[in-house]
Amino acid sequence: MEDLTASKGAHSAPGDKRLRIHGSVAHDLGVAIVSGRYSPGELLLGEIEASERLKISRTAYREALRILSAKGLVESRPKTGTKVSPRAKWHMLDPDVLQWIFELEPSARLLESLFELRRVVEPEAAALAAMRRTDEQVFRMERALKAMKEHTLATDAGRQADQDFHAALLDASGNPFLITLTSGVGAAVAWTTVFKLRHAPLRRDAIPDHRRVFDAVAAGDDGAARAAMTDLVNLALQDITPLAEPDAQRRKVTFSRD
C-alpha cells in the first residue's frame, strides 16, 4: 500500500488535524477502489493493522471508512470486516467519487456512460426550465454565461461559472428530483473539462453552445431548449471521446500491505 502518511492533509482544506488525516486516507483509498486496485468483495485492512501500517489513529481510519461507506464504496459487517462494495452500489455522481475517478484516466466506456446520463437528464431539464424559469433564474444563467466568457473554461473561475450555469438551469426546471442532481451534474461538467485540459488546450469554444441553450430558455421555447441542450451534450462528448482509449492506461496506484 502506498504510504498514506506521506500525503496526509494534501487533499483537504486546512483545519482540524484529524479531519485532514482521515480525509486524506479516505481520498487515497477511494482512488484505489475506483481505479480497480481493490476489487469488489476484497477485504480492507482492519483498524488495528491499518493504524499500525499507516501510522494513524484507529479513530482516523474508522472515520475514513465511514466516509467511503457513505459514498457506497465499502460496506462493513460485524466479524467479517470492511469490504469493497459492488460498483452498482457506488454513488457515482457523488462529487468526491467523480473527482477520484477523474484523477486517473477514465475509460471511454465510463465517459460515454456519464454523457448518456447527461443526455437523459439535461435536455428535459432545459425544456422544463424554458416553461418554468423565473426572471431571477434567467439572470443567474446570463450572469454565469458572462463569467464563462470573461474567464474562459481554462480557468477555475470559468469552470465554476459553467457549473453555476447548469445549476441555475436545473433549478429553473422546478423539479425537486432533478434539482437534487445539481452537485453531481456540476461535478461531471467540471471534471470532464479538467480531463480535456489535461490532454491539450480546449480545441473548441463551448460558450456559444451554452448561449443557444440560454436563448431558448429565456425565450420560453421548450423544444428549442431541449434541442440546444442535446447538441451541447453531444458536442461535449465528441470533444472528449478522442482523448480516452477503450482500455485507458491508468496511473498505477499501489497500496502494499507489507
Image (cartoon, rainbow, N blue to C red):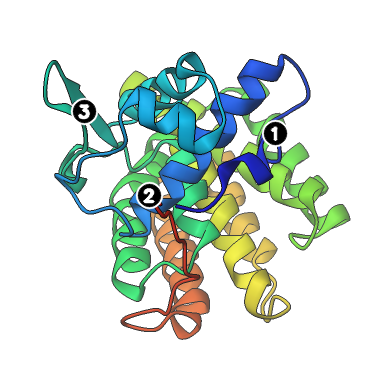
Q: Is residue 45 left or right of residue 39?
A: right
Report the residue at 45% width, 72% height from top: 250
Dot 1 amino acid type: Gly
| Residue 35, horizontal then vertical, whole percent | 37, 59
Dot 3 amino acid type: Glu
- Answer with mark 3 or mark 1, whichever residue precedes in sequence: 1
| Residue 102, horizontal then vertical, whole percent | 50, 58
Residue matched to label 1: 9
- Secondary structure at numbered mark 3: strand
Image height check: is 88 above or below 136?
Answer: below
- Secondary structure at numbered mark 1: loop
Disc 3 to disc 1, C-alpha distance: 25 Å
Report the residue at 34% width, 49% height from top: 33
Q: Is residue 249 left or right of residue 165?
A: left
- Answer with mark 3 or mark 2, whichever residue precedes in sequence: 3
Residue matched to label 2: 257
Q: Nearer the viewer, residue 132 or 230?
A: 230
Total labels drawn: 3
Disc 2 to disc 1, C-alpha distance: 21 Å
**Residue most extreme to the right:** 150
Report the residue at 50% width, 45% height from top: 28
Q: Nearer the viewer, residue 70 or 166?
A: 70
Image height check: is 195 above or below 16?
Answer: below
Q: Is residue 155 left or right of residue 49?
A: right
Q: Which mark is residue 75?
A: 3
